Image (spheres, rainbow, N blue to C red):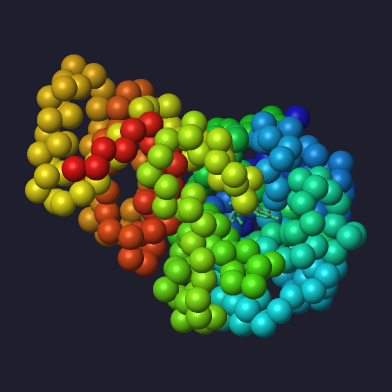
Amino acid sequence: MQTKILKIDSLNLDEKIIIVAELIRKGELVAFPTETVYGLGADAFNPDAVKRIFVAKGRPADNPLIVHISSYEQLRWLVSEYGENASKLMKAFWPGPLTIIFKKNKKVPDIVTAGLNSVAVRMPSHPIALALIKESGSPIAAPSANLSGKPSPTKAEDVFHDLNGKIACIIDSGSSDIGLESTVIDCTQKIPVLLRPGAITREQIANAIGTIKIHDAVRNKIDAGTIEKMKIKSPGMKYRHYAPNARIIVVEGEKGKAENKINELIKIYSGRKIKVIEIADKNEGAREIYNIFRIADKDGIEIIVISGIDEAGIGMALMNRIRKAASEIIEV
Ligand code: TXA
Ligand code: MG
């Protein structure tokens, strides 16, 4: 299959959106931009098309997908009921980078939810994503458009690198604004549970609905093997994720001590291809981290050392992704 790249300007949508929507309606796979990362979309009500998402990504079948909507009417097709917390969160943060877990409507194909009786839904704010969903006439199931286990794509070239020849088309509208995947919150529980941190922060969510729980795996400082053995709520949490080929070592703790440790590591690994990442600005760090990982792969970097940052605001999401990509976490 030839994978086409279509450039679309998000401030000046053109008829190319209609062509891509037609592909979705026909059951093809299409990569499209969102404000978080690029997604790999298929008609959520076409189980054969959704199945091909899992095949193209090499994604384990027990990891459910997020369904993207452009209207509240579409929400009713997907969800059986919801309470006040979900209501408040939608009002406060949709359209935007927040995914909410609901009790699912029986009509949602099992392949989308990996057989769970809940469904993850998000109304993105990116104009191209919204227009594509609306024009397709169906909610779009879409994981991040990377090969399973690789860093999420923040540019059309990243998608092309991972999925060329496996999907019909990629919409190119430049770099993602946020650069990390959406916040995921489970609202099927009495007290909502944060399953994945993102650009909508725990502080913002707590402001909107009061008390929430943070799932243990969100701030885990343990390696991927141990996580696999834990009892896990969000199936996606158990796989090593977002990872470049290099071995990632994260150094966390008081600044001076961390710097000493990093200097020690640089000495230990002298002669190897090593890259040190220090994050000065959290938002920029979020936007760039996957890109930095991908460039490190191209450059054949063997070891990446990352200095930890504080977890206020988007810092929590950034540290979560970094720890999940890590082979080793050193606390000093
Ligand atoms: O920003 C994003 O969320 C991007 C863009 C494309 O929207 N999408 C994305 O999808 O990151 P994906 O598939 O890479 O991550 C979906 C996460 C996984 O961790 C998955 O396990 C979790 O959402 N998830 C999906 N359905 C769920 C459910 N019913 N219950 C619990 N977790 C669920
Ligand atoms: Mg993903």
At horizontal 54% and vertical 80% (from top left) the residue drawn is 209
Depth check, front residue: 161 or 236: 236
Is residue 158 positioned above or below 20 on the image? above
Relative to residue 306, is residue 223 drawn left or right? Answer: right
At horizontal 12% and vertical 34% (from top left) the residue drawn is 263
Depth check, front residue: 130 or 146: 146
Asked where in the image residue 231 lies, by quadrant, the reply is top right
Depth check, front residue: 199 or 235: 235
Relative to residue 198, is residue 52 drawn left or right? Answer: right
Relative to residue 138, is residue 315 drawn left or right? Answer: left
Q: Which quadrant, please, contains the N terminus? A: top right
Q: Position of residue 227 (x, y in %)?
A: 51, 39
Q: Position of residue 65 (x, y in %)?
A: 70, 50
Depth check, front residue: 139 or 160: 139
Q: How many badges with numbers are in the image? A: 0
At horizontal 33% and vertical 53% (from top left) the residue drawn is 285
What residue occupies the far right of the structure in this picture?
107
What residue occupies the far top of the structure in this picture?
271
Is residue 47 positioned above or below 202 on the image? above
Relative to residue 107, is residue 190 drawn left or right? Answer: left
Please say whether residue 209 is visible from this viewpoint. Answer: yes
Please say whether residue 78 is visible from this viewpoint. Answer: no
Is residue 80 positioned above or below 56 on the image? below
Q: Position of residue 239 (x, y in %)?
A: 56, 37
Asked where in the image residue 53 lies, by quadrant, the reply is top right
Q: Position of residue 244 (x, y in %)?
A: 43, 32
Q: Which quadrant, please, contains the C terminus? A: top left
Asked where in the image residue 130 lies, by quadrant, the reply is bottom right
Is residue 49 positioned above or below 316 on the image? above
At horizontal 74% and vertical 33% (from top left) the residue drawn is 55
